[in-house]
Amino acid sequence: MIDLLAHLKDMLSVAGLSGFEKPIREIVQKAWAPLTDELSVSKIGSLHGLKIGRGEQPRHRVMISAHMDAIGLMVTGMQDGLLRFTEVGGIDPRILPGQLVIVHGREDLPGVVVQPPAHVLPETDGDGPVAMKYLFVDVGLRPGDVAEKVRVGDTISFAQEPLELTGEALAGHTLDNRVSVAATTLCLEELKNRAHQWDVWAVASAQEEETLGGALTSPFDIRPDIAIVIDVCFAKGPGSSDWRSLPFGEGVGLGYGPNIHPALYQRFEQKAKALEIPYHQDLMPRMSGTDAMAVQVVAEGIPCMVLGIPLRYMHTPVETVSLKDIRRAGRLMAAVIADLMPETLEQIQWEE
Amino acid sequence: MTKTNETHTELALEIGASQLELLEKLCNATAVSGDEHEVRQIVLEEIKPHVDEVKVDALGNVLATRFGRGENRLRVMLAAHMDEIGFMVVKKHDDGLFEFERIGGIDERQLPGKPVLVGREHLPGVIGAKPIHMTTSNERKNKIETSALRIDLGPEIGDKVKPSDRAAFATRFEVIGPSLRAKALDNRLGVATLIELLKHAPEQIDLLAAFTVQEEVGLRGAGVAAYAFHPDMAVAVDATPANDFPHWDDDDENDRYNTRLDAGPAIYVMDFYTIPDRRLINWLVETGEQTGTPYQLRQPGGGGTDAGAIHKVREGIPSVSVSVPIRYAHTAVSLARLDDWAYTLNLLHTALGRITPDLLAGERRD
């Protein structure tokens, strides 16, 4: 049995910003090696794990896409030993002052994000939120040493250590979307004991937060017949209470909207009901904000499902998730995949 | 800026592993104003073998005396506040969420996205923020108000946390390069300094050490401590902001830096509460000059220390303040240079050893 918490903490201990996924990819590689038959790395840096099905050749293929890249910052310059930076992925600058970070220079340098005092800022920024371009990172070194160790373009990752809250809640940075990678690991583990017919391609995709690069290229390589995209979704909490948010820790989100093939939605909903896995419909009226936006339109088009793990405080270093929902997502994916028969593909049709 | 990371063999008191270990313990402990228990315990344990008298007074101050020897000893009070800025849980909501109030001067822009430790059991919680995806560009022009934030302790917190519990930032102490990175360096640096000074107390004076409470909410502990000690003079040892950042506009100069890192202990010439006794300022400055210990004069202006309360107690007590310059005071993560702390400790240690009754013999010179 995989220790979910240990697996997650392992993944949270490394960086892996969009376009710089190597450290996280190596950890996922290790976790997936015993659970898959083949592992490869795509040209853009996504990890592909193939678990061969029991069906006869040619077998159908289902792809699971869980992006592994993280949001973070990147050095744009330095002034008196303090670093200026920009964002990688979408970050509200208001959550940055006082955050612990690691600057990945010639060596890893622990630091902190600095909100300078009003008297060195333009008047417009003095008392309100300070724009990202006026913030600094301080690595605690003297200016000469900073210049030797850090260059423009170096990445900066969040360094907040994960915290275990009550009720199997975990808080930390980059739970978006390492929790979905973890759910995929659990799914692969469960499938070891299931005689699934289809080939299963697990993808830890690259660059979701910036370019959707992994989600565009991996399905082109793999040419799956259907795809399950798993990502985090909004959980109800402070500042997040409208229809877009699902209850925290009370079940997975089943995405519904134009990125999702309705026949796949139905299979997931029926399976969740049958197994009494709690879920909520996650309405995505225009787009899902996930890899599915890209996967869906690769080559001649791919039917997609979007599975969501509710998460509070998305894109902050204290994103909070319930381990229960990660397990539910892994179990539901495995159950749906184990049910895919050679003839199932014909049933994934538009009703006419 | 000078590069000063060569070793200092000249210092009488070195900051070694045991001093750093004590500072780490002090910084990682929580002692929000009004609930200084944890730091008080550490202080009592550390100083008991080194002092002649020690008591905890009505407000929770630790008052420790180490008597000198010989005639005409001046009674010299040192004060360092034990308390730190933090929070009090004020209302329970559903789903593991709690409303909270700030204690001490905390810029609310420093709150979103921070882990905290709640209550005596240090239960971990987080102050989250609305996902950027759900904010509008108009909304992002305004700061996030404290009233919109909650401490999240997870859905099964039950009755383990209740309104009235205190919370503090959860940052753990670390040494990074030549720097110290921790919460509450304001004023655990002062507390650690006082402990060291007690351990190496000079013989020609009576050393009266006050580890004070409630400084961050109005200098409350220091006044009664000074009354009880009735000293001849007092020195507040604290931490003060080093706002030594470049101006955003390259053509403009930052002329309000307060203090600078790497420039040594900051001697106060005037702050919001106190006009220090010139004799004591000179005593410290001369000590720095004559021993080659780096020091800086803190820019006159706002801010304040326990001296603000002490100097007006009884018939008046000649007072001065010395601070370690630190960056990012009153936030989750403050940063200081090890060297600045070492020089602060040594300046004070040397200065105390040079005190004679003549120091206060004349009138206050202005």
Image (spheres, rainbow, N blue to C red):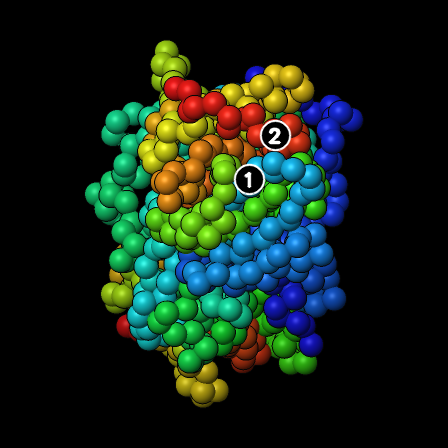
Please indicate whether residue A248 sits to the left or right of residue A127 in the image. Answer: right
Which one is nearer the viewer's eye here, B71 or A112?
A: B71
Q: Which residue is mark 1?
A: B76
- Tell me, for residue B355, which label it has, or none: 2
How many marks the image carries: the answer is 2
Give the answer, above or below, for where B338 lies relative to B364.
below
Q: Position of residue B67 (x, y in %)?
A: 65, 47
Please indicate whether residue B202 sits to the left or right of residue A203 in the image. Answer: right
The amino acid beneath tag 2 is Ile
Residue at disc 2, secondary structure: loop
Q: Quadrant of residue A280?
A: bottom left
Are the residues flagged by discs 2 and 1 in contact, CB closer than 8 Å? yes
Judged from this view, the residue extending furthest toward the left is: B138
> Callout 1: 10 Å neighbours few (<14), some, many (20+)?
many
Which one is nearer the viewer's eye here, A299 or A244?
A: A244
Residue under the point 32% across and 67% down: B90
> Callout 2: 10 Å neighbours few (<14), some, many (20+)?
some
Which one is nearer the viewer's eye here, A159 or B25?
A: B25
Q: Are marks 2 and 1 on the same chain?
A: yes
Residue under the point 31% across and 70% down: B91
Q: Position of residue A112 (x, y in %)?
A: 52, 40
Mark 1 belongs to which subunit? Answer: B
Mark 2 belongs to which subunit? Answer: B
Q: Position of residue A265 (x, y in %)?
A: 39, 72
